[in-house]
Amino acid sequence: MHTSIKLDTPVEFINITPLNPLISKCQIKVCYVGDEPNRNKSIITKETAKQMANSLPGCPIVGFYNEEKGDFEEHNRIIDISNGKFEIKDTTRPYGFVDLSAKVWF
């Protein structure tokens, strides 16, 4: 059975298979490939995507989950000003990793 969770960002989880109550295995669409600019105005050609794919196995999967929207967003930071100090805090969290035997597809 094909299960897909479409998000507002270019990430999409496909074929979700729970392995235990805390871990699931899935496929993830992570970027748009083409010769035209995507939503954030970047261009990732198929050649570039193939080169990037070589570094994916074993990489962490990180993101920011916006609880108010109930949606995953891109990497995120907040500015915290407290006790007279200015600090930038990363609110991106790890959610998993790319399997060492992952197959890249377009």
Image: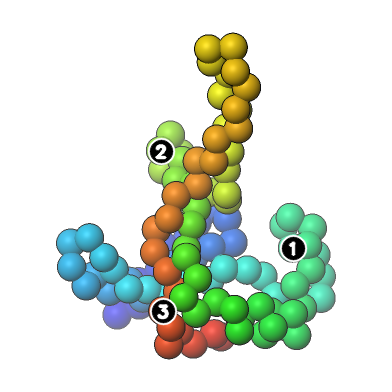
Q: What is the spatial separation of the Cα atoms under label 2 and label 1, in whole angstroms?
A: 26 Å
> Which x, y percent locates residue 82?
53, 15
Amino acid type, callout 2 = Glu
Name the residue tied to disc 1: 38
Quadrant, the N terminus: bottom left
Query: Which residue, given by chain and number where applicable, does mark 2 sit on?
Result: 67
Decide which of 99, 25 is in the foreground and name it. Answer: 99
Kindly report the distance in space between the C-alpha atoms of the residues bearing marks 1 and 3: 26 Å
Q: Nearer the viewer, mark 1 or mark 3?
A: 3
- Residue 76 in percent (x, y) is at 57, 43
Which of the two labelled residues, at mark 2 and mark 3, occupies the earlier sequence position?
2
Q: Quadrant of the C terminus?
A: bottom right
Q: Nearer the viewer, mark 2 or mark 3?
A: 3
> Mark 2 touching mark 1, by CB under 8 A?
no
Residue at 43% x, 34% y is 68
Residue holding disc 3: 99
Residue that protrudes farthest toward the top in the picture: 84
Residue 78 appears in the rendering: yes
